Image (cartoon, rainbow, N blue to C red):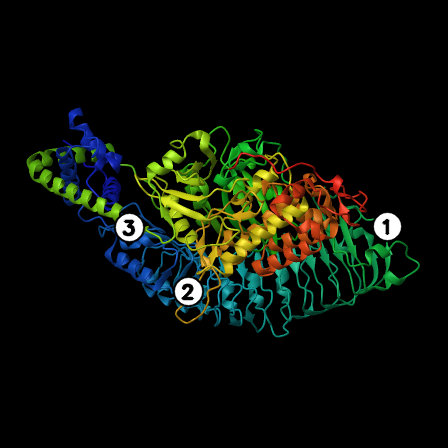
Amino acid sequence: MMTMPSNKSFIQARKVYVQFVHAHDSYTVSQHNPIFYWICVSFAPPQEKDRDLGLSFGCQAICFTGLFLMNHICFSAQTTDPQEASALRAIKNSLVDSMNHLRNWNKGDPCMSNWTGVLCFDTVETDGHLHVRELQLLSMNLSGNLAPELGQLSRLRILDFMWNDLTGTIPKEIGNISSLIFLLLNGNKLSGSLPDELGYLSNLNRLQVDENNITGTIPKSFANLSRVRHLHLNNNSIGGQIPSELSKLSTLIHLLVDNNNLSGNLPPELSELPQLCILQLDNNNFSASEIPATYGNFSKLVKLSLRNCNLQGAVPDLSGIPNLYYLDLSWNHLTGSIPSKKLSENVTTIDLSDNYLNGSILESISNLPFLQTLSLENNFLTGSIPATIWQNKSFSTKARLKIDLRNNSFSNIVGDLTLPSNVTLRLGGNPICTSANIPNTGRFCGSDAGGDETLTNSKVNCPVQACPVDNFFEYVPASPEPCFCAAPLRIGYRLKSPSFTYFPPYVYPFEEYLTNTLNLELYQLSIDSFAWEKGPRLEMYLKLFPTLNRSSTFDDSEVRQIRDRFTSWKFPGSDIFGPYELLNFTLLGPYSNLNFNSQSKGISGGILAAIVVGAVASAVAITAAVTLLVMRRHARYQHSLSRKRLSTKISMKIDGVKGFKFKELAMATDYFSSSTQVGQGGYGKVYKGILSDNTTVAIKRAEEGSLQGQNEFLTEIKLLSRLHHRNLVSLLGYCDEEGEQMLVYEFVPNGTLRDWLSGRTKENLNFAMRLRVALDSAKGILYLHTEAHPPVFHRDIKASNILLDSNLNAKVADFGLSRLAPVLDDEGTMPTHVSTIVKGTPGYLDPEYFLTHKLTDKSDVYSLGVVLLELLTGMQPISHGKNIVREVNVARDSGMVFSIIDNRMGSYPSECVERFVTLALRCCHDKPEHRPSMSDVVRELENILKMFPETDTMFSKSESSSLLSGKSASTSSSFLTRDPYASSSNVSGSDLISGAVPSISPR
């Protein structure tokens, strides 16, 4: 007797079948699901195989019949709950999906067809249907409204719309989802008030609506959220008083309501919250109320932040809070003296600045071993400053203490004024600064605020060419095996309320915390960069690398597991790091095609046997009839395919662009001989060809079967056919015969700018020539932004996409990733950006674009800024774990910018280089609004060029040799070599690099 397979196995097999049906354009089983191919092949003799179809029509008939019977006999009822499926369609209709992320929401069954962002339970419930478990639509550039039908997803546990552009109100119907655990709506433009009905969510663990435009008050019904641990309501316009009823939330650990319009009194009852760790209420207006004395009774509080809340009265005694790390009561109207009792020894931050405090500094602030920041400036404090604040402290090399006592009435220092090197003391605005009786105070009375935070990555000396940067690979900075090259996962991550003000001492504990949670080794994590934001919040970009001795990439299951850790909030609580948020989990390079919803499900042996037996037995009876149907279907398919190919060729007849025959291009390249290959990229290979009329061309041939290549092919033809500028590479023609995709360009003989900067050429470019290359490139990009119709954002500006012609004029190339700029909408408004999937090259990517997916003209400005820094330094954008933008910033801030100038550049006018550095770093500013426009870049480069003697700025063909050799450079009182201490006067042209126009292999 055959054992019936489990219900779960039926579901899994059904899923595979539905995927099979929706994937098919024909009944060619062998090209799709291997399980069904095995069913057919197992019963087909060798002579039944057909080279073109995979199986003969008879075998296909058997296979299809088995599948048909499997569907209608075995799995007739197991689909997504009809009400939930209908609700999902209504949700889709209320959204604007500009990136087409939800394109598969119009096909098939939500659970069985793996709709994007829809995760379902694996088991059928008593109603005979599957149900939606999670709706994960993080950072998909969605706009529109949240549909009331969300409330019909009755088994939903996670609702995640973080970091989109949603508007409208939060539907009250969400309060009907009693199973909901995470409600994540932060980072949108939602408005209206918080529905009272959200208080019905008895299983809710995390409510995040921060960074929206929410108004109204905090509902008292939130006191019914008996399991909530995180209430993140910050950065909205919520008003009214904090309900005292929130003190009933016995599981609450984080209450973040800062940056709102709250008023009234601070509820004393909040101190009754038994698990509360963070109370952050900054930037509200509590109507001149006092800080309740009961706040000294918090048992687990780690962070108390009440900055700029219009509070008055005394500073309460908080010495009874055993584990307080962070105290910020600044910018209020507090009076009286500083409490005499000592705070917790764990405290890192004490900020009581900008109040009306009087009295003296007491010993209670001394001998705090982990103190990083003591801010008491702008008060009325008097008396002496005890040196015990910084004495007898055991500083690690990464620790720092900043003491700001400015603008008080301190008249003396008790103890030794000799400070450890990592202590910063600021005394300006005190009588002590004018006292002749106290020596050595002058250096503490200036405006120096101390150094910035930096991280030092491990240095590796590895060959640059061995790691394919363009394919999103790089060396693992901390790898125990030297020069291990791998493709990292790139993650935008933010600590929303950390309990420290200086990160370096906590970098190692943070790395341990993160890697332990993700089950990774320490060397697999690299903190690429970090920056403090208002809050204060700590934003960082992380890179996670695969493990050694396995692969240079993570496999799909590992990527899914890592992402699941972030999106399901499985990180353990941390007093010091506080709550976190995932800003971005961008899949680039080898991970770009990963679909988080397409994880395959296994089928048990019992159900597979049942499928085989049923399919074969049934198929034998009706093979002939189905064979006829299949033959007709195949004929129609071949006919439609030929029409599709024909329509593709017809649609690509473009005015002014020649269509080449495949044979013509094959002969031009000696049938694509490797000896004619001059380059290779993600799109394919580039060949040098000589046409029948002796015209030399560059032929870009797509890799076979590259979907990304097909998109780039169409984009580049459409764009380049209408772009004409002396600083852009010209498109001459294309070929789309015999399954090929080729683009034919003008041949640019002197290779790429990267070739010249990396030393692959025989000669070097002096500064004047580098400046001219920068100006040419900027003019080409400015044409794309302002004169092309419609305007274009390049999206992949880099040194290897800037070519030099025979006169050493620069031309911008490779428009495969370009995007059209936004156009006027129906209301005549110009959008500020284009929403895209992140593409580009590491090191050149605008960090704002990487984080938000919002592409603007300033994204190209950032990339060009990186190229400008390459021109100055000769460095790679990312090399040996170093980022060129960070390295130049550090050198500039330390006054050593001339020490990193490329020594192959020869002599240069120092004032020109200084302006060039300033321009490049402005282009590379983290915030797009602080970057210049491309027209500003062109104007500044022209101004710098005008500072040269006239003979230095002439670039005719006859003089290009001089530009390389430096013979045309006249003397200047400000020309420098790379040595920052060298003499700056009367450097003659003979001191520059000598030589002629290089003879190099074009790329």
Amino acid marked by disc 3: Ile
- The type of residue carrying mark 1 is Asp
* Residue denoted by label 1: 416
Q: Nearer the viewer, residue 32 or 821?
A: 821
Q: Position of residue 273 (x, y in %)?
A: 54, 60
User: Can you tell which of label 1 and label 3 is closer to the viewer?
Assistant: 3
Q: Which mark is residue 361?
A: none
Using the image, tell me which numbered label, if any, was put on residue 199.
2
Q: Where in the figure is residue 985, as x and y percent of width and height?
A: 81, 47
Question: Where does label 3 land, which residue?
Answer: 650
Q: Nearer the viewer, mark 2 or mark 1?
A: 1
Query: SS for tag 2?
Result: helix
Mark 3 and mark 2 in contact? Answer it, CB < 8 Å: no
Q: Give the residue type that dot 2 points to.
A: Gly
- Is 85 above or below relative to 982? below
Q: CA distance from mark 3 to mark 2?
A: 60 Å
Residue 683 placement: quadrant: top left
Q: CA distance from mark 1 to mark 3?
A: 86 Å
Q: Quadrant of the N terminus?
A: top left
